[in-house]
């Protein structure tokens, strides 16, 4: 990692059992999400960070995702400033879906076997 560069990972490299933090808004979350992801919208994140720290192990890496990667990059940077091992998921949920990773949703069963 170069100085000042935010660590990013391709969706294909996200482990199936990873702690995935989804920072999209409620309507985006309802439309389709990764099974087991923790949902804390970016607009509420600072006030709800305790939910993440309760769920994450002390040395657990947090994979942060949004729609395309902009909001998650900001949250990743904030988490790293707090001493949390966080990486941005490059391409966000659009790349997740394009890579054929499983999704679940409230409105329709998307890619559910």
Image (tube, helix red, strand yellow):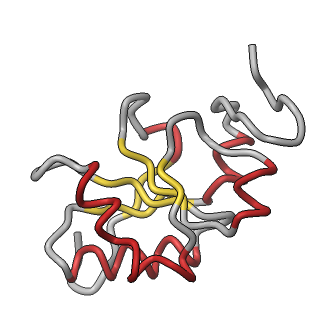
Furthest toward the left, the residue is: 58
Which residue sits at x=79%, y=63%?
27
**Most foreground residue, 70 or 62:** 62
Furthest toward the right, the residue is: 108
**Does residue 93 sit above or below 23 in this rendering?**
above
**Most foreground residue, 41 or 67:** 41
Quadrant where the N terminus is found in the figure:
bottom left
**Does residue 18 sit above or below 77 in this rendering?**
above
**Does residue 99 sit above or below 90 in this rendering?**
above
The picture places residue 19, in percent across and down from the top left corner, at: 36, 44
The picture places residue 57, in percent across and down from the top left corner, at: 16, 47
* Figure quadrant of residue 2: bottom left
Which residue sits at x=75%, y=21%?
112
- Residue 90 is left or right of residue 55, and the answer is right
Which residue sits at x=42%, y=53%?
9
Furthest toward the top, the residue is: 113
- Residue 83 is left or right of residue 113, and the answer is left
Quadrant where the C terminus is found in the figure:
top right
Number of numbered discs present?
Answer: 0
**Does residue 19 sit above or below 83 in this rendering?**
above
The picture places residue 99, in percent across and down from the top left corner, at: 67, 37
- Residue 98 is left or right of residue 76, and the answer is right
Which residue sits at x=37%, y=30%?
17
The picture places residue 42, in percent across and down from the top left corner, at: 54, 77
């Amino acid at each position: 990692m170069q100085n000042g560069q935010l660590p990013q990972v391709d969706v294909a490299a996200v482990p199936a059992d990873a702690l995935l933090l989804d920072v999209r808004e409620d309507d985006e979350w309802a439309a389709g999400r990764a099974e087991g992801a923790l949902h804390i919208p970016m607009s509420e994140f600072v006030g709800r960070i305790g939910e993440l720290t309760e769920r994450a192990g002390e040395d657990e890496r947090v994979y942060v995702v949004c729609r395309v990667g902009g909001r998650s990059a900001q949250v990743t940077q904030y988490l790293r400033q707090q001493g949390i091992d966080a990486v941005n998921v490059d391409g966000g949920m659009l790349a997740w879906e394009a890579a054929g990773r499983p999704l679940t949703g409230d409105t329709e069963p998307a890619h559910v076997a």
